[in-house]
Amino acid sequence: MRYLPLTTPDRHAMLAAIGAKSIDDLFVDVPAEAQLAGPIAGLPNHASEMVVERHFSDLARRNMAASHHPFFLGCGAYKHHVPASVDHIIQRGEFLTAYTPYQPEIAQGTLQMLFEFQTQVARLFGCDVANASMYDGSTACWEAIGMAGRITKRKKAILSSGLHPHYVSVARTMAKYTGDHLDTALPSLSASTDSARLLDAIDGETSCVVVQYPDILGRIEDLSAIAAKAHEHGALLIAVVTEPVALGAIRAPGEMGADIVVGEGQSLGVGLQFGGPYVGLFACKEKFVRQMPGRLCGETVDAEGKRGFVLTLSTREQHIRREKATSNICTNSGLCALAFSIHMTLLGEKGLRGLAQANHALAVQAADRLARVPGVELVNDSFFNEFTLRLPREARPVVRALADKKVLGGVSLGRLYPNASELENGLVVAVTETASVEDIETFATALQEILS
């Protein structure tokens, strides 16, 4: 915080109002042995704002910025070009209303944007209805599992081995407190997914099946058979999309029978942002809307017949009794949802399909080139803009060596699955429109030098 408004007389007046002689009186209940006797060891004394800015700028320069080097990282966070107009529009006054619409009908700009955002997400995912966003993809995934449990009155969720391990980790954390049983497995370093395992595991106790599309290794499969088997046993299919740009080129999960589709919207409008904030996407069939967590904005007309927007549904603890809530989600990612919606609007359907085609074409070119490096094998037989390579040695030190050569060359599966030795040679590579042909060649040359 740059502005500290309280002066010394202000502080004295505040202390006098509560009957304290000094700030030290505020800590009389803290035992003396628990109080610091002096400055914290190793922590420097205060410095001027200019000195602090210079220090942190020096620290920031140690980072390898994604925009400065060939960049092929992915696994749930993708580097796309975000037009400068996105940042300009999100700062317009009509959108800079309350971040969370606690008095929603006053914030018409916010509500209209969220209504349009919901429409875009629902159409993108092939679903009937979408909510006004969630914290991120991983929490949206867990909320979908919880929602399926409420609908089916069951506690068994079958998670595909291709689901992002961070999403699995969030689900495990929450399941400890809800009593849900999660049937999980590690992925195999092969072109085949674990659809056979999922189909065999579905039974009358299953609440839902959770499948990532495309999955953590970039593999793509038709979800129709899994949806049919789940529905046959009264269970739901939850599809997880971590790269929404992919849906400009491949079928939407809702069109293949998914009951709930969730995902991460970071790749459109939001950018990498050093790990956050992100924006969770959540959509479902209309018949399940009453169990959907978060907010739902709707369109109506006022007393004069003019179009207006309202908060139609907010089934959570802040608006209704806690025991009746579908979720403890307290807000939506309004600013990130706005950025997502603006980027989608600027692209339009034609632009999104064109962006998807550019991503896929570059990914195919990169996969072909990298697979020609001696000892490197392409695992996938289908992918969008992300694929997995099998290296002739452990991938983690290779990734480190690539970084030393100023190439951010993918994510090692050994880092995502540290206790799975059978995956340690796997390298997941993401290629977006921000990569050039020269970047691909630089990556391939560096990889060949490291492996030779």
Image: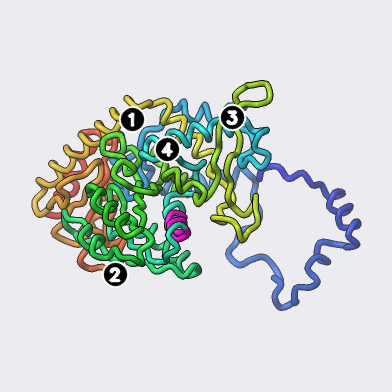
x and y percentages locating residue 116 in the rendered image? 49, 31
x and y percentages locating residue 87 in the rendered image? 49, 30
Callout 4: SS: helix
Look at discs 1 and 4 and give the one toward the viewer: 4
Q: Amino acid at mark 4?
A: Val
Residue pointed to by mark 3: 300
Asked whether residue 65 is in view, the answer is: yes
Callout 3: SS: strand
Task: Give the residues drawn in magenta, as a range.
Answer: 142-150
Spatial distance from mark 1 to mark 2, Cα to Cα?
38 Å
Mark 3 vs 2, N-terminal side: 3
Callout 2: SS: loop
| Horizontal relation, residue 448 to residue 413: left or right | left
Residue pointed to by mark 2: 419
Callout 1: SS: helix
Which residue is more in the foreground, 101 or 5? Answer: 101
Question: In which quadrant is the N terminus drawn?
Answer: top right
Point 43% across, 35% down: residue: 269
Residue pointed to by mark 1: 352
Look at discs 1 and 2 and give the one toward the viewer: 1
Q: Amino acid at mark 2?
A: Asn
**Colour scheme of the rendered structure:** rainbow
Point 35% across, 58% down: residue: 234
